[in-house]
């Protein structure tokens, strides 16, 4: 998923409001299995915002006047909450795979593409030990569409941008893949797959904030040095992200629109969207080489 252009150029105070409202009103609504009500993403109302801001001694005058008429800022703010909820409830939810479905897609691609790229194992033990399905799919699809160009499927060093053969910026964390190289990449990506987890722990939450850190460093690079590196995040597992981590999905949609990640590819979307992305990267690579 890429950003909706309506929300891409919003100022920092817009996102301060988004975070405060999300935290105070709530990111999500719990479902009720007995009544057949599924869990969903919440859309805050102006009434809820006013009540919560009042408790925090915050003003809502930038959002609406005393009669409840929305300002231009308020309209785009509430439009964003509606957009975020609709895209997650109606589209993203359906992309997530369970472990068995991911394994089927992994094995299908492996048989079809006969890859030479790394197909790493997950970090589980015993009966849960298996291939890292999403990582394997990403690696195979990148290899299949780069036309023999180099690619670092498993960087063992920090991403570095250079100027005159000297380091200009070096990111704080290692990423999961870089094209064509971890030095002066056209694109870097991170992969968050949790097919065997049974709870939403701090390790999963920390992964979201790690992506945010990378995005902030890349934003500084682009502003200060006019150097753009495409930053993509791949995530999957229906239980982890939809059943347990819906509030973090909201944060991911926020990150896309804040410009901290260029695209988040959700679950089975990898099968259709990644080939398109790789072709874009390859076109850039060929232009630079020529």
Image (cartoon, rainbow, N blue to C red):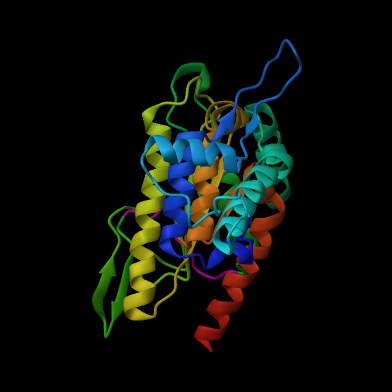
Magenta residues, start to end: 148-156
| Placement of the C terminus among the 4 image quadrants | bottom right
Residue 110 sits above or below residue 9 on the image = above
Q: Quadrant of residue 171?
A: bottom left
Q: Can residue 153 be spotted in the picture?
A: no
> On the image, which quarter does residue 263 sit in?
bottom right
- Residue pictured at 54% horizontal, 43% vertical: 250
**Relative side of 248 to 216, left or right:** right
In percent of the image, x 48 and y 63: which residue is there? 259
Q: Residue at (59%, 73%) from the top-left corner?
A: 282
> Is 152 in the magenta?
yes
Residue furthest to the bottom in view is 290
In terms of secondary structure, what is the magenta stretch mainly?
loop
Please state which of residues 102 and 11 is positioned toward the viewer in this rendering. 11
Can residue 168 be seen here? The reply is: yes
> Of residues 249 and 182, which is closer to you in this image?
249
Task: Identify the image quadrant of residue 35.
Answer: top right
């Amino acid at each position: 998923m890429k950003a909706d252009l309506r929300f891409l150029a919003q100022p920092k105070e817009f996102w301060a409001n988004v975070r405060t409202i999300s935290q105070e009103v709530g990111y999500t609504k719990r479902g009720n299995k007995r009544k057949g009500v599924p869990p969903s993403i919440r859309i805050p109302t102006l009434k809820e915002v006013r009540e919560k801001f009042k408790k925090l001694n915050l003003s809502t005058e930038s959002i609406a006047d005393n009669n409840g008429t929305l300002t231009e800022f308020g309209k785009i703010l509430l439009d964003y909450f509606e957009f975020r909820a609709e895209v997650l409830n109606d589209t993203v939810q359906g992309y997530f795979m369970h472990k068995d479905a991911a394994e089927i897609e992994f094995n299908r691609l492996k048989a079809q593409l006969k890859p030479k790229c790394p197909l790493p194992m997950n970090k589980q033990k015993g009966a849960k030990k298996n291939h890292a399905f999403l990582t394997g799919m990403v690696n195979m699809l990148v290899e299949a569409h780069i036309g023999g160009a180099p690619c670092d499927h498993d960087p063992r060093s920090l991403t570095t941008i250079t100027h005159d053969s000297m380091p200009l910026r070096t990111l704080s964390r290692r990423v999961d893949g870089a094209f064509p190289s971890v030095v002066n990449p056209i694109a870097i990506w991170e992969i968050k797959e949790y097919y065997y987890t049974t709870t939403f722990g701090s390790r999963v939450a920390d992964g979201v904030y790690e992506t945010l850190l990378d995005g902030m460093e890349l934003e500084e690079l682009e502003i200060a040095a006019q150097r753009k590196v495409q930053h993509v995040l791949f995530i999957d597992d229906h239980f982890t992200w939809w059943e347990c981590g819906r509030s973090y999905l909201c944060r991911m949609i926020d990150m896309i629109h804040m410009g901290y990640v260029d695209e988040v590819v959700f679950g089975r979307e990898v099968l259709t969207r990644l080939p398109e992305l790789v072709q874009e990267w390859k076109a850039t690579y060929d232009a630079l080489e020529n």
